[in-house]
Every structure is written in structure tokens, then in C-alpha cells.
Image: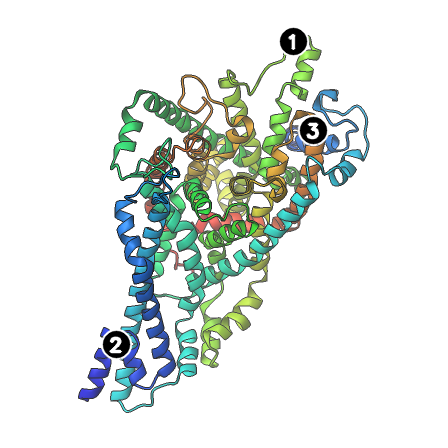
Amino acid sequence: MKSTNVKTKCSYVVMGLGQFLYGQRIKGLLYMAVLGLYIWYLFSAGITDIVGFFTLGTVEGDPWLGVAGDDSIIMMLKGILSFLILIAVIVFYFSNIRDIKNTEKLVEQGKPVPGFYASLLSFVDKKFYVVALFLPVVGVAVFNILPIIFMILIAFTNYGGDIVPPKLVDWVGLSNFAQILSLSGIKDTFVRILGWNIIWAVSATIINYFGGLFLALLLNKKCVKGKTFWRAFPILAYAVPGFITLLGFKFMFSYGGPINYYLKAFGLQAVGFLDIDAGWKARIIGLLVNAWISIPTSMLLATGILSNMNNELYEAASLDGAGRWKQFTKLTLPFVVFSTTPTLITSFVGNFNNFGVFYFLRGGLYLDDYFLASDTDLLINWLYNLSIDNNYYGIGAAVSLIIFIITSVISLTAYVNSSAFKKEDTFR
Amino acid sequence: MRKERLSEAVITHIVLIIVSFVFFFPVLWLVLASFSASGSIYDYEGFFPQSYSLGTYIKLFSDTQMYDYPSWLRNTLFVAVFSCVLSTVLVILTAYTMSRFRFKMRKPLMKTTLVLSMFPSFMGMTAVYLIMINFNLINNLWSLILVYSAGAPMGYLVQKGYFDTISNSIYEAARIDGASNPTIFWKVTMPLSKPILVYTALTSFAWPWSDFILPNMLLKNRDLWTVAVGLTHLGETEFSRFAAGAIFIAVPIVILYFSLSRFLVAGVSDGAVKQ
């Protein structure tokens, strides 16, 4: 009795040692191998990585003197990675403890300890979700969570502009946010873009939503013959890849394009619809093009919802003498709006962050009174200009955090209020 | 009353014709442009080319000095096929597990994906770009495939909605017969999930096939470009080459969507209700 407890305690100190002593050789060795690898990593790189995360480098590189120097960005990445590895090892450690307790119980009851192959099989069966989710979770952690953590951290550094490796990057606290909210050039740009972004998101969502609803109702009418035929046209528009549509429309409104051809044919001046000084012309074209792209999606959505509607309601309503318009406002609209509230929110957020439209229609234009942006750019386009085109990584990351806060507040309020999320098991 | 009905039907159909025209005409315009004998948009008579020929398509595949369309197409196909296979496996596994099992980490995981999806997609991409630059993984088609497939499990909700509709009693019956969970997954769930498998495979093929942002960031070498990146580099004088290249890449996707439109309605509205 005493000796088994000692064996169990061994696993608290050295992961896998207990399992090994109980006779589960391979499992014990595997656990110990993980521990050994981690200790080897810790001493060969891990500890320096963790320290480097906080200092972000102390030696500035100098090619003239042949000093290699520290690369702050790599140090930060390796630092994040070392924390993620630490978390993974802790998870392993706890699984080791749970495992050794199970084994101890089996031994106490005098049952035989399962061999490696048997315990592997029973693990794959009982903990199928762990096996199935392992790869997806690792993938998401490395390619989604790590980058996002990295960007959040970048928002608090002075990375960007002149300060890129080999220069050393430093933690600067909230000064990027302070710059966005106070420095005159950046602040004006931010406020203007935010204003236009909100106007854009609201009007684009309304246009697309009601456009789609209108189309779906039109196609749902009893008098329409050949519904599949008519529905094919919006679906065609839906199926064409977005960048092709956007570039196509850019050609259509360009100087040599057909619209200007007809203007000139009528003896008018060619209009630079998407030029740098286009202003509202470009904004309205953007809204229309976006409607062309998005209305088919919301039409499909509304069609699906309308087909779930109870027809008896309409019969009852028309018996009660309700007119067509009244049926629409009192029956159809509340039903559709009720069942699409969550999508309405996602589509609002999607429009808020609609990168493609203005990137393709008139990307890369900078107006004089804007800081690296033009009057049609949304926050997300500004973010692109700042970080990808002009290396203002720190400020760019701060802008993306602000976008995140805006969109997550909007969507969280919506999710909290949507019953679909709370009652997902109702229909099982 | 009859007359009223008739005039309503006429008005409805007139509106439908206008709407269809609006959706169809830009597409038709591009198709015509791809058959134009002259490449530059300045030689057109408004929407229509002056004369027609197959020349642009031949040029697209033979005149590869400046714009190497065949190799763009090869790269796109390579990326799309591999991402499609990997993403489908990962998404189906995630969705099935989230739907079928109840475990301690389930709700936290679901909430994490929810929060992650609220970050502007771009933010992660900027970071991926920086990471790839720093680790010298830029100009590599495999890094594209990795990013596409690793991010795919985040969009598991539609598939989870499908698995939610499979009744629990089937699983319980299989369990009583002594089937282990992996066996259930292969022998019970997979045969029932053909529609959602097809839907997942096609959407995860279509995304890299027509994505522009990520390849534009990660592929700087001309001969590694995908079609989407290459086409954006064609100016007004290469308009019909653009049109031909666009038609060529759009046709497979359009065919896929039409053969799938049944699933699409279901997929879009499922996603809406489940969120």
C-alpha cells in the first residue's frame, strides 16, 4: 500500500516515472521523453526566449562592426512560442497525474494494469474528442491565436516606421493609442474614416438586406413562372469570385471603360469616377457594387427563411380582411427580421470590415489631408495601408484592436440576445 | 379581379427582367470581352468589342513572357487542391466532435473561436505576414496551404449544424452493439454525411481558388503568383486578357455553385439560425 503511493508520488515529481514503475513501460517512457525534451528545450533556448520576451533585445546589430545584434521581433515571437509550449507541457503534466491516479486505483483493486496498446485503444475510444481535436486545435493555435497575440502585443510596442530590425523594438505601453487619439494628422484621419465607416456599414447592410428580401419576395410570388430560371441570375452573380467582379467594375468605370465611352458619345466630358478627387461618386459606386455582390447572398437567406413560414397565417389574415401591405408589415417582415437578427449582425460586422470593395476599386490612393488613406477607405483599408504598405506596424496593430473592440461589442450584444445560441440543444 | 392579377404578373415579370439584366449584363460583358480581337479597353465600342476572335484565349496560354497564366493556374490548382483536402478533414473532425461529444473544454473552445472570429481577419494576416517574413517562409506555396487549412476549423458552425440533426439514438444503438468511437465515426457518421462532405470540400476549394489577399501578401515571385494575384496586375490595355483569364477561373466555380445551389440555400440558412 505504502509502496504504491510512493510510485504515484514519483509521477508528481518526474512525469511518467510512476507509470514506468507500475509496469506501464512505454507510456512512462513517452511521458518522460516529453519532460526530457522540454528540459532540454528550456536550457538550450527556452529560458533565453522567455527573458528575451521581456527585454526585446539588448544588443543593437551593427554591420560595420560585425555585431550580429538582437532581432526584437523574432525574440517576441519565440517568447510567445515558449509560453505556448509551457502551457502545453502543463496540460501534459496534469494528464499524467490523472493517469497515474487511475492506475493506482486499478492496482489497489488488484486489477491488472493495461498494457500500452490496450490503453492506447481505450484512450482513442473514450477520449475520441481529444484525438479528433488535436490537429485542429494545434493548427488554430499556431496560425490564428499566435498571430493575434503577436499583433495585440505589437500594439504596445514602437515597432514600425524607422524602427524595424536591426534596430531594437521596445515596449511603449499605450502610446500608440494615445497617438491615434491625439496626434493631429492621425487623429483627424481616424475620426473621419470611422465616421465614413459607420455610414458605410449601416447603409450597405440596409441596402443588401432589403434588396435581398425584396428579390426573395418577388421570386416567391405565386404568379412567377420558372422560378429556377429567374433565380439563376443572382446565383450567377453570387458565384463569380469577388475579386473578378470588383476588378470588372473597376474597368467598367475607368476612363477607357464603357460608361465613359457613352458619356463621350453624348458629347459630355469623361468622368473620373474612381479618381482621387471623386469623393461621393466613388462612395456611391462602392455601395452599388457591394450591393451587386451581396444581394444574392441575402436573397438566398431570405428564400430559405420564407420557405419555413407558415402559410395558414396568411390565410387567416386574408380571411380577417388584411390587405397585402398589411400582411407584409404585420406578418412577413416581423417573421423575417426575427429569424435573421443574428445574420443581420454578422453582415453588419462583415460590411464594417469590408476590405475588398475599396481596395480593388481604388486602392493605394492617398489624399493630402488624410494620413496614408483616402476618403473611401474604411478602417480595415487604412490598417492595410499602415501596416502592409507603409510598415507602421505598431499603429496598425492599435487600429486593429480598436476595430476589434467596436465589432465585438456589437456582436456580443447580439449574441447575448439571440436565443439560438443559448438553446442549441432544444431540437435534439 | 382577373385583370388586376394579370397586370400584377406583368409588372412582376418586368421587374424580374430588369433585375436579371442587372445581374447578367456585367457577366455577359466580361464574356464578350474575352472573345475580343483587340486587347485594349480603348478599342471597344462601349460595352462591345469591335470584332471577335479566340485569339485572347490562345494568347493567354502561349504568350507567357510577361504574364505566365499557365503557371498561375498550376499554382492556384496546387494550393486549392491541397487546402481543400486538409481543411475538409479538419473542419469535419472539429464539427463532428463539437456536435457529438460533451466535454469540459467544449464551451470554452466554442467561446474562444467566437472571440477569435471577431478580430479583423486582417489583423492575424498581418502577423502571419510578419512571421513568414521573419522565418523566411515567404514565396512558398506550402505556407499558403498551411494558413488556409489551419484556419479552416474556425468555420465549423455550418457543419456542426448538420451533425446536430443526426439523431442521438443512432449513436446509442451503435454504442450498445459495442462499436468504439472511431468505428462510429467511420462506419456510422461518414456514410450519413455525404452532403455536408461535398459542401465542405467545395467551399474549401472555392476559397483558395479565388482568394486574393493572402497570396498577394505571401507570394512576391512572379512565377509563384496565383491567378487572382496575376490578374490584378493587368491594366486597361490588357483588358481582354484579364477577361479571358477571369472567365477561365470563374467557370469551374460557377458550375460548382450551380450544381450545389440546393446545398447552398440550406447551408446559408443553417449558419444563420445556429450562429
What amino acid is found at the position of numbered circle 1 in the picture? Leu
Residue B209 placement, left or right of B181: right
Residue A39 placement, left or right of A302: left
Q: Among all residues in the image, which is located at the extreme top?
A: A267
Res. B238 mark:
3
SS at mark 2? Answer: helix
Report in which chain the residue with disc 2 lies: A
What amino acid is found at the position of numbered circle 2 in the picture? Ser
Question: Would residue A390 be seen by someone viewing this image from the given angle?
Answer: yes
SS at mark 3? Answer: helix
**Where is residue A32 shown, x and y percent of the image?**
33, 74
Q: Among all residues in the image, which is located at the extreme bottom?
A: A110
Quarter of the figure with residue A105: bottom left
Label located before the other in sequence (1 or 2): 2
**Where is residue A327 shown, x and y percent of the image?**
49, 36
Callout 2 environment at 10 Å: few (<14), some (14 to 19), or many (20+)?
Answer: many
Query: Residue visible at 45% across and 33% down?
Result: A384
Q: Which residue is mark 1?
A: A268
- Circles 1 and 3: CB atoms closer than 8 Å: no
Query: Residue visible at 31% across and 35% down?
Result: A158
Callout 1 environment at 10 Å: few (<14), some (14 to 19), or many (20+)?
Answer: few
Res. B240 mark:
none
- The CA span between labels 1 and 2 is 85 Å
Callout 3 environment at 10 Å: few (<14), some (14 to 19), or many (20+)?
Answer: some
- The CA span between labels 1 and 3 is 26 Å
- Circles 1 and 2: CB atoms closer than 8 Å: no
**Where is residue A407 shown, x and y percent of the image?**
36, 38
Instruction: Please tell me which residue lies in front, A22 or A206.
Output: A22
What amino acid is found at the position of numbered circle 3 in the picture? Glu
Discs 1 and 2 share one subunit: yes
Report in which chain the residue with disc 3 lies: B
Q: Which residue is mark 2?
A: A11
